[in-house]
Image (cartoon, rainbow, N blue to C red):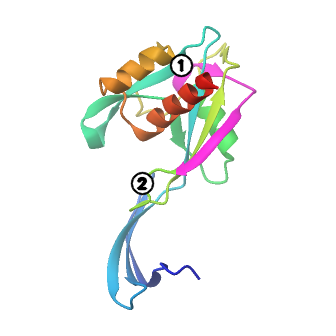
């Protein structure tokens, strides 16, 4: 048993949506007191760092409603039920960029917001891109525009806060680390 474990006494399911489920748990704390925890349950996601032959990173710009603005991000998407992360990675790459690959390198997995969500994101890298001969239909409610940047340009975008989501920042730091080795 973990010394900081919180035992769930009761769970109230609030919402069961297409992307997330929301619940409120009553828990017993390690000191015996009780508290409420608002939790988001998520099926998990993948992110892909696509590198072109001329060493540019492919990003997508898309509108993010919770922020009420567009973000420049690496391609990413939600795992479908029973789908392996590698399959999701290729599917999202094809849908969002018009490229495919048969070579993915696993980078890492990380929790995106562990204070309130259980989403686990798996990150992959590919520098073996092939353009699709036929466009793959993406999500009907998703609109993206491709942006290709060098690593130096991407780092400048981070400084200017034109790129400022966690997964994309992690990807840029990872590529910077590879470059230094």
> In the image shown, does 157 or 16 lie closer to the viewer?
157
Give neighbour class at mark 2: few <14, some 14-19, many 20+ (Cα, 10 Å).
few
**Magenta residues (range):** 96-110
SS label for mark 2 = loop
Mark 1 and mark 2: Cα distance apart in space: 25 Å
> In the image shown, does 163 or 142 lie closer to the viewer?
163
102 to 79, vertically: above or below: above
Q: Which of the 4 quarters of the picture holds residue 24?
A: bottom left
Q: N-terminal of the two: label 1 or label 2?
A: 1
- In the rendered image, the residue lying farthest to the left is 68
Q: Position of residue 150 (x, y in %)?
A: 50, 14
- Based on the picture, tell me whether residue 82 belongs to the magenta stretch: no
- Based on the picture, tell me whether residue 101 belongs to the magenta stretch: yes
Quarter that holds the C terminus: top right
108 to 146, vertically: above or below: below
Residue 13 as seen in the image, left or right of residue 67:
right
Residue highlighted by disc 2 = 113
In the rendered structure, find residue 57 and report the number of the disc placed on it. 1
Q: Position of residue 89 (x, y in %)?
A: 62, 36
């Amino acid at each position: 048993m973990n010394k900081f474990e919180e035992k769930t006494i009761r769970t109230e399911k609030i919402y069961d949506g297409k992307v997330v489920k929301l619940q409120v748990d009553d828990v017993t704390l390690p000191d015996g007191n009780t508290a409420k925890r608002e939790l988001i349950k998520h099926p998990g996601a993948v992110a892909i760092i696509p590198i072109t032959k001329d060493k540019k990173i492919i990003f997508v710009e898309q509108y993010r409603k919770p922020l009420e603005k567009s973000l420049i991000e690496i391609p990413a998407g939600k795992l479908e039920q029973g789908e392996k992360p590698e399959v999701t990675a290729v599917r999202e790459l094809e849908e969002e960029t018009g490229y495919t690959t048969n070579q993915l390198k696993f980078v890492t997995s990380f929790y995106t917001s562990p204070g309130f969500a259980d989403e686990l994101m798996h990150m992959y890298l590919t520098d073996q891109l092939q353009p699709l001969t036929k466009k793959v239909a993406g999500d009907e409610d998703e609109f993206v525009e491709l942006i290709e940047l060098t690593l130096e340009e991407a780092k400048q975008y981070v400084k200017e806060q034109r790129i400022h989501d966690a997964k994309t920042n992690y990807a840029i730091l990872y590529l910077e680390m590879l470059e230094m080795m």
